[in-house]
Image: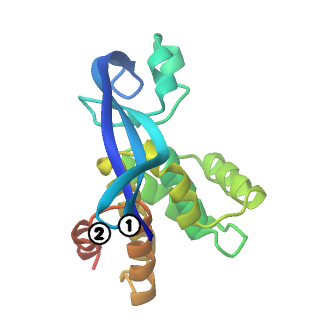
Amino acid sequence: MLFPTGSASRLTDRGTFSCPSCRELRPYSRVVVGRVIRVFAIRLPAGKYGEYIECSECLATWRPAALALLQTTDARRITAEYERALLRVLALLVISDGHIHDEEVATVQRVYAAVTGGFLTREDVIAEANDVAAHPTTAARFLSQVVGYLNDRGKEQVLRGAALVSGADGRVHDAEAELVRRLGAVMQLEPDRVEYVLRSFT
């Protein structure tokens, strides 16, 4: 029988690039996240989830196209993968009823700022909400599609954002905690790490 076992990361290259976050030349690691299955006791490769560039200084991850960025003006046009993923997950979680209200916009802005240190305008949030409406999916399905572009730090930041939204009313309820655990499992985070993040908000 075949049993899926998740992923295995493999370092494929090192070098120096213009990090869009640091705005400086930084060392990087290029990592391929492979899909692995188990046939009885044997682990076998089965394609890949994705590939990312990790800045050795700030630990942000980028798609390999970031290696072509040489000018600061170009770097400003792209966002770290975990920030892109976090914004989409926030929109999916907060706007689950298909509508967006002022308090929901404020929640997305507050959580995004708390996790990334960045700032979203009302227009940024509305644009993401409209894109979510045009391309409906679930947070878990979306994360399964982008997990190969996130390192463990990025995954944890996304999970922190989900936990903050779940605890927006001052408490993470059982159903909300289970959703956070599901998102952690989709991102292949260790259960102990997921529980640590949950305890931070309870």
Q: Residue at x 45, y 42 (%)?
A: 149
Furthest residue to the bottom? 174
* Left or right of 175 in this view: 134: right
**Quadrant of res 200:** bottom left
**Quadrant of res 104:** bottom right
The residue under label 1 is: 184
Rendered location of residue 167, percent (x, y)? 39, 76
Identify residue type, mark 2: Val
Mark 2 is surrounded, within 10 Å at the Cα level, by few (under 14), some (14 to 19) or many (20 or more) other residues, namely many
Mark 1 is surrounded, within 10 Å at the Cα level, by few (under 14), some (14 to 19) or many (20 or more) other residues, namely many
Instruction: Specify whether residue 105 is in view.
Output: no
Instruction: Specify whether residue 75 is in view.
Output: yes
- Of mark 1 and mark 2, the one earlier in the sequence is 1
In whole angstroms, how far apart are the C-alphas of marks 1 and 2? 6 Å
Rendered location of residue 196, percent (x, y)? 22, 70
Which sits in the foreground, 57 or 152? Answer: 152
Q: Residue at x 43, y 59 (%)?
A: 111
Tell me the quadrant of the picture where the N terminus can be found.
Answer: bottom left
Q: Verify CB contact (< 8 Å) between mark 1 and mark 2.
A: yes
Rendered location of residue 59, percent (x, y)? 28, 36
Q: Does 195 appear above or below 35?
A: below
Q: How is the image coloured?
A: rainbow
Q: Does 29 appear above or below 46?
A: above
Number of numbered discs present? 2
Furthest residue to the top? 70
Numbered badge on residue 194? 2
- Dot 1 falls on a residue whose secondary structure is helix
Identify residue type, mark 1: Gly
Tell me the quadrant of the picture where the C terminus can be found.
Answer: bottom left
Q: Does 95 appear above or below 131?
A: below
- Dot 2 falls on a residue whose secondary structure is helix
Q: Residue at x 46, y 51 (%)?
A: 147
